[in-house]
Amino acid sequence: MAEPMFLKPYFQEKMWGGDKLATEFGYQIPSDHTGECWAISAHPHGPATVENGKYKGMTLNQVWKDHREVFGNAQGDVFPLLTKILDAKIDLSVQVHPDDAYAEEHEHELGKTECWYVIEADEGAMMYYGHNAQSREEFAEMIQKGEWDKLLRKIPVHAGDFLYVPSGTVHAVGKGIMVLETQQSSDTTYRMYDFDRVDASTGKKRDLHIQQSIDCAMIPHKDPKLNQKHYQVGDVAVTQFVSTEFFAVYEWKVNGGQGTFNRGTAPYTLVSVLDGEGQIEVDGKVYDLKKGMHFILPYDVKEWTVRGKMQIIASEPGEKA
């Protein structure tokens, strides 16, 4: 019988992390500096575990490796997407991610294009997003001189904002912000600036990757143009935030009614419940949903109905995935 594949996340402690993954989502986290919930992950650095059905107890990367039919016999050596929730108690490092070609050559994994849906943001919260250099020479010179205030671009963000972060974008999640991140399944990050911080666990500054950052940065920075779409599926208000070669990301707002979705062309769908509670019905069976749950709708789930009062972020692999 076709059914959703519910997942148990993997948690990553970070020097910039806090405790909101526990206080806001009720997760059992390893410490009060937990920065990342790898919610839907087949990456070896933090694989999620299947919680139900015939693959219960297996990691998602095991299912991808041994049961590719679950994903419509999708091609590729690695499961292409990774869904995270990030809790930034303080600023993350300013960083750049490589594209597929650079990452394959130098890191032997996928590049990292990602996007953020802002779940919460303190008043006055800012993202580092882009830079002001007009040439690679100017970019390198400003880094060498430490002219960070002049180089880095900061923008205000609020709950409900969406930012697309293609590979090459200079960026950092700022303090007091919690995001749901949809990204390529890569753990390659080039740290360009870390505010001269010392990691309490090691007593040392964290490594920087200046040359890689210069190599990979988009110069000059250009904000992506997003062609967002809004439509209804039954009573569910749907926003398509972005659709690229890597992934498509949607918000489903379930406001007391219900909506029935069809599989379409995507081989599988990743789903995260950010708020509220409700139900999903698949093949006549009803599953209860609540805030903090994450699951995959496999290839054999051709139709599903959601009902209740929920905010959901869903994603699908793009043509390059």
Image (tube, grey):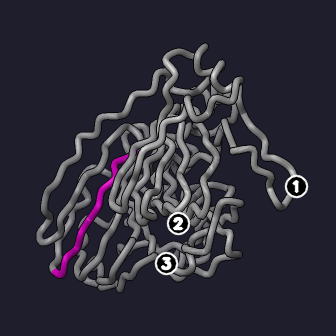
- Looking at the rendered image, the quarter that the N terminus falls into is bottom left
Residue visible at 62% across and 69% down in the picture:
18
Question: Can residue 66 be seen at all in this image of the molecule?
Answer: no
Mark 1: few, some, or many residues within 10 Å (few <14, many ≥20)? few
Q: Is residue 214 left or right of residue 80?
A: right
Provide the residue span drawn in magenta. 247-256
On the image, which quarter does residue 227 sit in? top left
Which amino acid type corresponds to the residue marked 2 in the rendered image?
A: Ala
On the image, which quarter does residue 312 sit in? bottom left
Q: Secondary structure at mark 3?
A: loop
Badge number at residue 203: 1
Which amino acid type corresponds to the residue marked 3 in the rendered image?
A: Glu
Percent x, y of residue 183 = 49, 49
- Looking at the rendered image, the quarter that the C terminus falls into is top left
Badge number at residue 39: 2
- Report the mark closest to the observer, 3 or 2: 3
Residue visible at 37% across and 33% down in the picture:
223
Q: Earlier in the sequence, mark 3 or mark 2?
A: 3
